[in-house]
Image: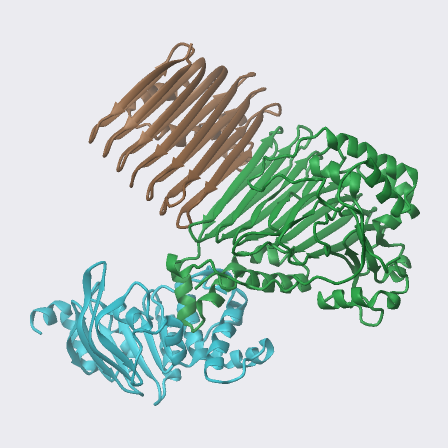
Chain colours: A green, B brown, C cyan
Amino acid sequence: MKKQNIKNIANQKYKFGFKTDIESYIFKKGLNEKIITQISKNKNEPPYMLEFRLKAFKHWLTMPEPRWSCTTYPEIDFQDIHYYSAPKTNPKKENLNKIDPKLKKTYDKLGIPLLEQKKLEGIAVDAIFDSVSVATTYKAQLMEYGVIFCPISEAIQKYPDLIKKYLGAIVPYTDNFYAALNAAVFTDGSFVYIPENTICPMDLSSYFRINTEKTGQFERTLIICEKNSQVNYLEGCTAPKFDTNQLHAATVELVALDNASIKYSTVQNWFAGDPETGKGGIYNFVTKRGLCQGKKSKISWTQVETGSAITWKYPSCILKGDDSIGEFYSVALTNHHQQADTGTKMIHLGKNTKSTIISIGISVGKAVNAYRGEVKISKAATNARNYTQCDSMLMGDQCDAYTFPIIEVNNASATVEHEATTSKISEDQLFYFQQRGIDTEQAVSAIINGFCEEVFKKLPPEFSVEATKLLGLKLENSVG
Amino acid sequence: MAHHKSIIIKKNIVKTLILTEKKDTDITYNITMQKNSKLTLINIKNNIKSTDHTNIILAENSSLNCIYISLPKETIENHIQVDLNGKNANCKLNSLSIVNKENKIINKTLINHNFSESTSDQLFKNILNDHSYSEFSGLIHIKRHAQKTKANQLNKNLLLSDTAKSIAKPQLKIQADNVKCAHGSSTGQINQDELFYLQSRGLTIKQAKTMLIMGFAKEIIDFITIKKVKKSLEKLL
Amino acid sequence: MLKIKNLSVKTNNIEILNNLNLHIKAGEIHVIMGTNGSGKSTLAKTIVGHPQFKASKGEILFEGQNILKLAPDKRARLGIFLSFQYPTEIPGVNNASFLRMAYNTHQKSQGHPALDPLEFEDLLQNKLKIANISEKYLDRAVNAGFSGGEKKKNEILQMAVLEPKLAILDEIDSGLDIDALKSVANSVNSLKNKNNAIILITHYQRILNYIKPDYVHVIHKGQIIKSGDKTLAHKLEKKGYEWLITNP
């Protein structure tokens, strides 16, 4: 594409940038043992959880803030963050019709009605507002199948055996700086338990909303899929526009036992910061990991990353069970001043394990987009296979695209392939659209959607439509 | 002890350098290629230990063709940095390493495309036996405004033993939008279908394997156009 | 419908078209012939506004309006269509969606309502018959992995959907076997009517056994050096271009 065709103006509107004016109970800024104890107290946690938090906190204090990713941002002052914020009116309502009208309105505006009679067909939603879950739909109906879908704060009280067994088992707090921080201060997130021989009767989804300025959201999600069971889980996120950065440091753990299958899809649409100045936006520092513990188990990550000022995220799979399968399908679009350092790890431990990585990075404006990945075939992983494909597209001459894979093979029977290409929208393709009467902006959007098609088709249909729209919106006015 | 060698390939000069070290080495080569020069660099290391650094700067229209053949005793490390500083500068790096016992081959490359319209091509092949180890770490950096660059990088590892280990880090840093850039890496054992095909034509499994391994190696050896060198290499393998 | 006056086009400072003149009325079929590099394709691309080909002199009037300053998509929406010599592959973009997107931009510019996928599918059924192309190509990505013949048929399908006033067919006959050639020619004939016009660019007389032109022009060094009726094409076939170049 021609240089003069690419402009950086793009005063595109972020549709979800509004703030809900609601009275909240907010902790004063700062992080120490007292604050952590208070979080635990507010959540009515049993003593084992406070112990877990404090251990994690002690460990966190010994760790330096990591800087190895391809992103630049000023030092984060962890004492300048509110670690807890919850709407005052909310003790959680089991009767959804009694939910605070202001919250109800907020979720209506986000397209996620929570009221009993209006709630989404066929999708159960856990709505998380700052530090608390404010509503969970279809809870009782799911329980009839033995499926537990509730806020993790509730699971900590109700299902201590499952929590003790799995929380921190896949991502221990020693794993990394943000995993330690999350373990110390996590507030809410979703808990999913699918019992043996059960195909979850509807898709489950969590919707994360950060509302209060200078607040950190420390999401913790745990999904357990017992033998021969299946679940489809969707995650969505938005936040208001603020000039200051907000931190979202999540930990997500998945466990799949024999023959179980978890499909985890994310469409991320946090506020990305001011397009002109790069001011504000979410720092999204996330640890997501799935353990394919059982034979023939399968974990599939699909992500569409369009939001956040900075994304730092590597949804990974540990393929422990023989014949288990790991998948990672990702589209990351960065525009303006956004920076994304994302990718995956596939750790092959079991025999005949298979993994597929399809990563698509699109970099526009002054953005940075990096793929970082690791494929490791351990000695015991006989007949392991991996196929990786990384495609990047650059639009404009001020953006960067990086590809940093590591491929480690310790078993001769492995077949590991990695391919990466860089492309641009060709003038010929653009002209072909134009000759058929389609203007440049629509053409660019269609070509980029085509470029992402391989990943989009892995998304559940309603997410796929949303992702297509989102890309269009993000690219608006980036072509002149 | 490390020592330095500086080589300048003058304007319009065509030169071939064949380096066959007999003793362990620890050398830094600094090679400057002036406009329109051509250099073929053949580096053969057989049964030695070495850590060499080769830094090559290419000016406009210059053309570099490097072939590395490494059969390490203990460890061979080749550090190669190429700076493409002019239009139409182009470099080819081809490497074949055959590693056995507990020996190691480490190839690290950095290709800087500092100017527009330059090209680079890399092909690094490793054959690993016994407890051997290979590491390929290659970075292609296409600098801002180095438009119309073409860069390719490919690493292929053939594992002949269950106890061999290979690590590949093929990396790209791209800061210009009008470029063609691709990299790839594949690791695996001898293709079983190919093996079966040869056996079905009456070859013993050993013959068939040797043939396929030679086939894997040949792609690199064929880049050597000097007959004498090529012959002696084929003998060696 | 189309008036080209004293058109000169340069690319990389080389003059490819030089003072070219051409008048086309509704209902006519014009054939443009010439050797490689004579300027045939440049003429086609200049009319549709390819960014590499800019007029240095002259004008192109389409229904009285000078279109040289219009963006290519605007020209397309006025009703000018180019069947590309080498149709571009667009991976990942569904052929049917692409057709609908193109169709709806035309609808919108004419103040007509856009069609939803179901309505559009009805419209497509008839068009598929005209273009003699199988429905299965609708579900594939635009031109991606199509054979030469399939690409040309897909161009004709687009022409059938968009119903242009002026269709420029750039070597629609190249790379086709005899069956495909007949099929494409039949499609073009059935799309022809008294309100539209066609410019057929070709090397060979062969396609003129199926499509009957009103005029034949020979282009050489960026100028039309001879115009006539279809007998001119026959003569050329027998005697070669050399004859005309040496005896204009």
Query: In the current view of this chain or complex, which residue is farthest to the bottom?
Result: C194
Residue nearest the viewer, comparing B72 with C59: C59
Q: How many marks?
A: 0
Q: Is residue B98 above or below residue C117?
A: above
Query: In the rendering, at what x and y percent does residue C118 appear?
Result: 60, 78
Query: In the current view of this chain or complex, which residue is farthest to the front?
Result: A28
Image quadrant where residue A18 sits: bottom right
Q: Is residue B46 left or right of residue A405?
A: left
Question: Which quarter of the rendered picture does the N terminus of chain A lie within?
Answer: bottom left
Q: What residue is drawn where x is 52% and y is 74%?
A: C100
Q: Is residue B158 left or right of residue B7?
A: right
Q: Is residue A24 above or below residue B198?
A: below
Can residue B216 be seen at all in this image of the molecule?
Answer: no
Query: In the rendering, at what x and y percent does residue A356 appear?
Result: 62, 45
Query: In the rendering, at what x and y percent does residue B223 appear?
Result: 34, 30
Question: Which quarter of the rendered picture does the C terminus of chain A lie within?
Answer: bottom left
Query: In the rendering, at what x and y percent does residue A5 appear?
Result: 40, 61
Q: Is residue A99 left or right of residue C47?
A: right
Q: Is residue A44 above or below residue C81?
A: above
Can residue B55 be seen at all in this image of the molecule?
Answer: yes
Q: What residue is drawn where x is 74% and y is 36%?
A: A180
Image quadrant where residue A473 sits: bottom right
Residue nearest the viewer, comparing B13 with C202: B13
